Image (spheres, coloured by chain):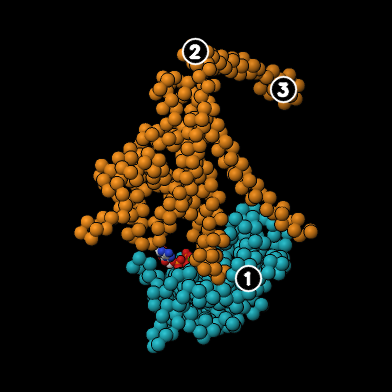
Chain colours: A cyan, B orange
Amino acid sequence: MSGSITMRGVRKSFHGTEVLKGVDLDIAAHSVVCIIGPSGSGKSTLLRCMNHLERMDSGLMLVDGELAGYTEHAGHLREASARSTSLVRRGMGMVFQQFNLFAHLTALQNVTLGPLRVLGMPRAQAEAEGRELLASVGLAAHAAKFPSQLSGGQQQRVAIARALAMKPAIMLFDEPTSALDPELIGEVLAVMKKLTTAGMTMVIVTHEISFARDVADTVVFMEDGAIVEQGQAERVLSAPRSPRTAEFLRHVSHAPRLVQEEP
Amino acid sequence: MTSTSLERLAALPVRRKTRVLSRWVPAVLIAAIVVGIGWAFISAPAMRWDVVGEYLFAPRIVSGVGTTILFTVLTFVIGLLLGLLVTVMRQSGNPVLAVACGAYIWLFRGTPLLVQLVFWFNLALIFPYLGVRIPAWGIAIGGDANDLISPFTAALVGLTLHSAAYMAEVVRGGFLAVPGGQVDAALAIGMTELEAQRHVVIPQAIRVILPPLGNQFIDILKATSIVSVIGGGDLMTRAQQIYGQNYQVIALLVVASLWYLVLVTVATLGQSWLERSLDRGRHRRPAVIATEVTA
Ligand SMILES: Nc1ncnc2c1ncn2[C@@H]1O[C@H](COP(=O)(O)OP(=O)(O)OP(=O)(O)O)[C@@H](O)[C@H]1O
Ligand SMILES: [Mg+2]
């Protein structure tokens, strides 16, 4: 698995309100894509459709050129089994805005649960790899702590380690720093930046424009359930072609939190 | 004002209020009242302690205690299983099942247990025959309701259906307390729905459910005494039968109360032990892992 994603005509409605209005998106294997856009534009929903936490109403998705979510069968498409959906998900790590660490498990147990229960890895190996992962996100000393004993930034780093433990080809991040106090954002972004060199495909929904400029190959701007503009990161962020992209960028770069963040 | 320097104030001796009177006078008064009432009760000529002693371990009473424990345990276990079933059906997404379960809970929580018990006991008045009977084909599976519904079965059915409605709410509360993001995270690491429930949701729901379940157990224990109205054969039934013969009403109520106190105390101790060991597990687990590392 190398980690390319292709989406065509993806639509999704909640209670009759269309949230995704036919999204076409190509994500190259090993690339880093940042998705930006105003609140409610459908970024989270798009990400959740990618790993089938949300079922799309229509549209197709290919992962590494293979149909995901459907199987072709005697001239028609049939909804994939729960089993094959969970196989697709194994190849895609997801990091949530609210961390969603398993509250009843320690940091290490959070990281090893997937390898133990889903991959059937021997415990000794799972724990050794888990400790290594925790060390790589700077949390070697916190392996035995429960989520409630960790700061938000530490929890989010455990969540990243938990996703990495499945050795996914693709990592999906849904506003991983939005729920964090400003002084904790940096430690999470640093871990993510380190990951960009590991060759995984990374899809990152974020409001951190300077981070996007720093790490992204491609920036996608979404508004109102559709992709308004996408292209090479520096180009989209510095010289947006759509006036709506320009307007959004002007808006976020005037947000006080970002100003405060500039060193 | 300026002469009030801090140093001068700090040098002054402090005379604290002595709380001896305000603390001890009410305490002594209350103790005296309690002891007085207690003694009046214990020493009342009508209080036949010899009768209490005579019946405390009488075979009929002891077998009644056994029946009370049996009712409690059966009601708790079957009620919990039924409650789980109702919860699963209610959350299944099937609207017919959901409405049926909602109606069940509404009906059985909304009517008094006493009424339900008498109702089950008199089921024969509505359905004289329980089972399937098609006279034209000569089929008859079942029997006379009066034969099938003994006081024991009526009591058990009544208690179980009543408590299951409460258990369903307790169980549902436990599952609702686990945020949806936990399932998302479990699915995202490649678990199936069932694995997510088993490894992530249920272990967390149990922690929420256990304390109220302990309370349910104690509530059921005391509620079983109501089955005496239909002669269910429990401790209270036995006490009533005995004082119906010898008119030692108060003495036998004291016997029953002593037994209920013992049972409830044991159940309460068990509950707090269970909760403490759950709590300890939560704090101890990191230590266990730490020793694994050094070993
Ligand atoms: N499960 C759901 N049920 C109903 N409506 C939903 C659901 N999930 C999302 N929506 C709606 O879909 C729209 C898009 O939501 P989404 O979370 O994808 O936006 P977003 O771009 O991620 O916004 P934000 O930046 O605030 O996270 C919103 O109007 C939201 O209210
Ligand atoms: Mg979102």
Q: Position of residue B153 (x, y in %)?
A: 39, 43
Is the same chain shared between marks 2 and 1? no
Secondary structure at badge 1 equals loop
- The answer to whether residue A176 shows anywhere in this view is yes
Residue drawn at the location 71% of the way across and 67% of the way down: A124
Parent chain of label 3: B
Direction from residue A154 to residue B53 in the image, left or right: left
Q: Which residue is mark 3?
A: B9
Q: Chain of mark 2?
A: B
Q: Chain of mark 1?
A: A
**Gap between marks 2 and 1 measured at Cα:** 72 Å
Mark 3 residue CB less than 8 A from any atom of ligand 1: no
Q: Quadrant of the C terminus of chain B?
A: bottom right
**Nearer the viewer's eye, disc 1 or disc 3?**
1
As drawn, B11 above or below A51: above
Element at badge 2? Answer: loop
Residue assigned mark 1: A120
Q: What x and y, as percent, mark residue B209? A: 51, 48
In screen coordinates, is B118 left or right of A131? left
Mark 2 highlights which residue? B44
Give the Cα separation between the discs numbered 1 and 3: 73 Å
SS of the residue at dot 3? helix
Residue at the top extreme of this rendering: B45
Residue at 40%, 36% (x, y): give it: B232
Q: Amino acid at mark 3?
A: Leu
Dot 1 crowding, Cα within 10 Å, few <14, some 14–19, many 20+ = few
What distance separates the C-alpha of mark 3 from that of mark 2? 61 Å
Residue drawn at point x = 49 percent, y = 51 percent:
B174
Identify the residue at horizontal 55%, vertical 70% (top origin). Answer: B190
Q: Earlier in the sequence, mark 3 or mark 2?
A: 3
